[in-house]
Image (cartoon, rainbow, N blue to C red):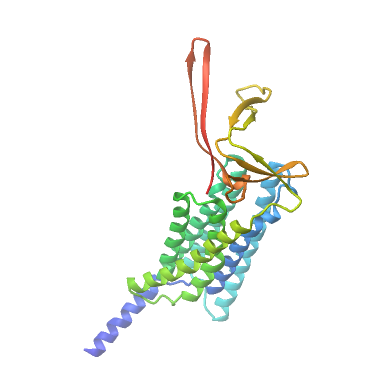
Amino acid sequence: MSTVASQLEAIHSMLAAGHRSIRLQRHSLLLWGITGGVLCLGTEHVITPERFPGLLERAAAVLLFLGIVLSGVALADFWYTRHRIEAREESLPFVQAQVTKVWWLLIAMGVMFTFATAFFGGGQMVFVIWLVLFGLGIYVHGLFSEQILEWAGVMMILLGIGALALSAPYTAIQWLAASAFGLGMPLLGAMLDRGASKSAWTRAGQSALWLAVVVTPAVLAYQWRQSHQLPPQAATIVTLPAGTRIPLNIRIGGNIVQGEADLAVPLTLARPLDVVLLDGKPTGMFRVADGHWKQRARSLWIRDVQLGGGLAPTGPVATVSMMVEVGP
């Protein structure tokens, strides 16, 4: 009986190895993770409005920068993986080659989405999309390799969707993505167990550990940055009290309307607003009612834009409604 049981166990192991016939190399997780974390925090310091003032110019710079860096990482990962496989006198499995193509396609989709946000909006979702795409790539790889990758891929996808559903601040999502890539993926490399089968409780414990390592540094880094975000010493702070009327200049153009002069729409502040000026010009930094200092590009949101219209006795009428809010 013991001989039969051992033979059945050997057959089961062979079948399992055939189903999960590829491996995600630890150096791949380390290489992609560190690169992703650095890009999340460093791209905005490389591609700046001062260096690339035009919208098309800045979008093209982002496309080239991400394309060159990520293509270099993809080639380096592919060549080193092939070198490691050949050193073991093995061949590159067909399934692994196809999964690699899926991974490259997901990366290309992320680059194109980032490029498109410069023209069609949605920049608030950039890091969410990258989390979802990386998570999907890891999950697909886990279907053919190791069970822990499936769990990690799902967790990365849920982190991105959860941050979007909770309307997390842009900077908080940025730090979350940087932590998931820079810390989470290298940690995942250390958790690989060569396809060993584990119980659901074991995988749940590993997942809880992974989430703690990813989320805790991101939360601490975001809080630290918020508390240390202060105006430059040479700047001037101008306080606008509640009730101040601010004219909003609007210019509308397009292919169905003629360009008109700026329209001034008066807005009234509901709460006091502190604005930072440097050499007499706004820097984009502000705070509401003695709150934390914020950047206009990341914290001022326009939501629920609705277009309407109809016919009045005087002629056609068009209406626009929107909500202007300051993010948390």
For residue 2, above or below residue 46: below
Which residue is most to the bottom? Answer: 2
How far across and how far down the image is residue 305, in percent? 51, 34
90 and 19: which is toward the camera: 19
How far across and how far down the image is residue 196, in percent? 39, 77
265 and 43: which is toward the camera: 265
How far across and how far down the image is residue 1, in percent? 21, 89
**Is residue 320 something that shows in the picture?**
yes
Instruction: Give the residue displayed 51% in from the left and 72% down from the top.
Output: 187
Which residue is most to the top? Answer: 313
Which residue is most to the left? Answer: 1
Q: With 238 as the anchor, is 325 left or right in this view?
A: left
Q: With 83 as the anchor, is 150 left or right in this view?
A: left
Instruction: Give the residue displayed 63% in from the left and 63% down from the top.
Output: 38
Image quadrant where residue 3 sits = bottom left
For residue 15, above or below residue 264: below
Q: With 203 as the anchor, is 44 left or right in this view?
A: right
**Is residue 40 something that shows in the picture?**
no
Instruction: Give the residue displayed 59% in from the left and 63% down from the top.
Output: 37
Instruction: Give the residue displayed 41% in from the left and 66% down from the top.
Output: 151
For residue 324, above or below residue 172: above
The total number of labels drawn is 0
How far across and how far down the image is residue 145, in percent? 43, 70
For residue 47, above or below residue 274: below
